[in-house]
Amino acid sequence: MAEPVKVLVTGAAGQIAYSLLYNIAKGDVFGKDQPLILVLLDITPMMTVLEGVVMEIRDCALPLVKEVISTDKEDEAFKCIDVAILVGSMPRREGMERKDLLQANVKIFKSQGSALDKYAKKTVKVLVVGNPANTNCLTAMKSAPSIPRENFSCLTRLDHNRARAQIAYRLGVPSNDVKNVVIWGNHSSTQYPDVSHATVKVEEKEKGVFDAIKDDAWLKGDFISTVQQRGAAVIKARKLSSAMSAAKAISDHVRDIWFGTPEGEWVSMGVISDGNTYNIPNDLIYSFPVQIKNKTWSIVGCLPIDDFSCEKMKATAAELVEERDTAAEFLASV
Ligand code: NAX
């Protein structure tokens, strides 16, 4: 049997982790033959809850799980890990300013970035989920200079899956017949869900999504705002934020890093911008279409961009620049 892969999940006592840990433990992410060591990190007041999560993982009696380690200590949690899925973050409380939220998260992700730098394997793959995910990812990346920047990404796969599902639902086709949607930019309401390069299989024929739907007003209007506002709509209905779908999206994202993307297809991921691609400023974690091979992503860099898309891609980049600059002030002072 292969050596176990050591996977850290932070925010492990929270609601996303509750679904995610089961997906990982049963082999949906790293494969059905891959043994695992699961490391669960949460804050000290959550340790009793975490004990319950550990009991449940054991009670699942899943053969791939060789060991479960639960802790509130970062040095223990980040030690020799192969994969870090950083879900835990400071949530927005009522009356909290956006700046205060950013500051609290800079503190968390600076500390976890430093722990990655000190204790993790240099090959570690890091996915940041906790919001504001793009900027938290940038903070962690900057705080871990010994780990390649390309090893960091943030989650926009939930938005990607939501966009795919909206198109599939509208056409009454299975969601895996919709390919190559793109989420550009920030995992926030300024994100730009773009289907101008996407295709769909209708009655055994592959077509462009605009061609298949024949309703440009919807695709450039309600479709975009539905995807942008989907998180808020789920909270309004469920009184809790997306958890099952978030866990599924995290599983999709990490599985694609591990095994690669199918030939001719891309997925959306927040990755470091080098300033040379699609005129997006450098030093941002920006969501692009990426293809993955040998555990390494590359941006799909040659898609034609019309004026409508260009405006929207710039707007979400501007929001990320502002977040980055505010975070940089805090990063220097914490
Ligand atoms: P929960 O509040 O249920 O769980 C969060 C957990 O993180 C808690 O157990 C908390 O104690 C823990 N935590 C806080 N600070 C920590 C630290 N410094 N170290 C370790 N653990 C810490 O939230 P949940 O619904 O699980 O959501 C988690 C995060 O995912 C939130 O920030 C949320 O906004 C974000 N999301 C991001 C998405 C994305 O697409 N990027 C989508 C889903 C989700 O909304």
Image: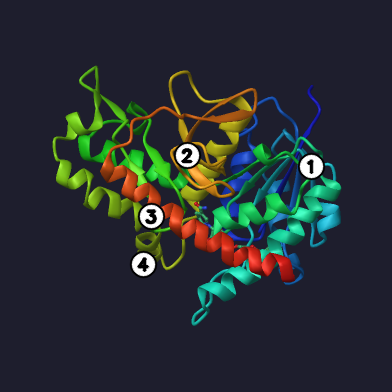
Q: Residue at x 48, y 44 (%)?
A: 287
Between label 2 and label 4, give the one nearer the viewer.
2
Q: Earlier in the sequence, mark 2 or mark 1?
A: 1
The colour scheme applied to this rendered structure is: rainbow
Q: Residue furthest bottom?
A: 95
Query: Which of labels 3 and 2 is toward the front?
Result: 3
Query: In terms of depth relative to the viewer, which is nearer, 314 or 18?
Result: 314
Q: Position of residue 156 (x, y in %)?
A: 48, 46
N-terminal label among 4 and 1: 1
In 3D space, how far apart are the residues under numbered discs 1 and 3 (Cα atoms)?
Answer: 36 Å
Task: Tell me whether the residue at label 3 lies in contact with that at label 4, contact meaning CB atoms closer than 8 angstroms.
Answer: no
Report, in whole angstroms, how far the alpha carbon at label 4 lies from the one at label 1: 37 Å
The amino acid type found where label 4 is placed reads: Lys
Residue 206, by quadrant, is top left
Q: Which residue is mark 4?
A: 236
Mark 4 near mark 1, Cβ–Cβ under 8 Å? no
**Residue 66 seen from this side:** yes
Q: Residue 288, labelled with which disc?
A: 2
Secondary structure at badge 4 equals: helix
| Quadrant of image for the N terminus | top right
Q: Is mark 1 within 8 Å of ligand 1?
A: no
Mark 2 Cα shell of 10 Å, populated few (<14), some (14-19), many (≥20): many
